[in-house]
Image (cartoon, helix red, strand yellow):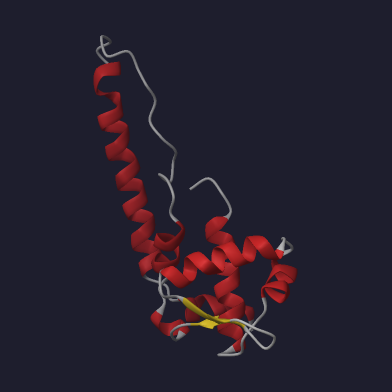
């Protein structure tokens, strides 16, 4: 995951968790992250699909957490934004080479092991625990 989606999603959820059920606009959230509100709306749409947030449209609308921050693990956030391998993708080596014909299998194992270790760490921390760092 060589992009900012995890940090953006975690920023959104942290703001929502600190506001405790208050509906926040995408403009307000975008101001905190310092990005375009369209980026926030796209990520909110994704987080909604994973059951982490709920939104209300209209003049007094906005977004809030769909469940308590204590019930959201940081691994849930990672799983919601994971688009590709943490370390990247494998290459297209020469299949006639002694290394090339097996390297991707071993790289995939290495990548999966590293990602599983990271996910185990994220599983240990809830959004509420993360939010408490900001008081």
Asked if residue 109 is positioned above or below residue 96 in the image, the reply reads below
Residue 16 lies left or right of residue 34; in this view the side is: left
Residue 132 seen in the current view: no
**Eyeballing the image, is 92 above or below 87?**
above
Where residue 14 sits in the image (x, y, percent)? 57, 76
- At a point 31% along the width and 45% down the height, the residue shown is 112
Looking at the rendering, in which quadrant would you find the C terminus?
bottom right
Most extreme residue toward the top, as rendered? 96
- Residue 27 position by quadrant: bottom right
Residue 127: percent from left, percent from top: 48, 76
Q: Nearer the viewer, residue 82 or 118?
A: 82
Judge from the rendering whether residue 2 lies leftward or rightward of residue 72; answer left or right.
Answer: right
Can residue 107 be seen in this snapshot? yes
Q: Is residue 69 above or below residue 120?
A: below
The foreground one among 52 and 59 is 59
Q: How many marks?
A: 0
Residue 94 quadrant: top left
Q: Quadrant of residue 63?
A: bottom right
- Find residue 12 and report its horizontal and vertical position in percent: 59, 71
Whole-percent x and y of residue 80?
A: 43, 62
Q: Residue at x 27, y 31 (%)?
A: 106
Name the one closer to the observer, 52 or 73.
Answer: 52
């Amino acid at each position: 995951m060589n992009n900012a989606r995890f940090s953006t999603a975690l920023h959104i959820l942290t703001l929502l968790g600190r506001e405790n059920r208050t509906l926040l606009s995408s403009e307000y959230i975008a101001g905190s992250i310092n990005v375009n509100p369209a980026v926030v709306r796209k990520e909110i749409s994704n987080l909604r699909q994973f059951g982490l947030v709920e939104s209300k449209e209209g003049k007094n609308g906005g977004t809030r957490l769909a469940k308590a921050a204590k019930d959201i693990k940081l691994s849930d956030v990672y799983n919601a934004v994971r688009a590709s391998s943490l370390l990247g993708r494998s290459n297209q080596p020469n299949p006639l080479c002694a290394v090339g014909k097996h390297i991707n299998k071993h790289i995939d194992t290495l990548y999966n092991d590293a990602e599983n270790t990271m996910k185990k760490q994220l599983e240990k921390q809830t959004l509420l625990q993360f939010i408490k760092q900001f008081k």
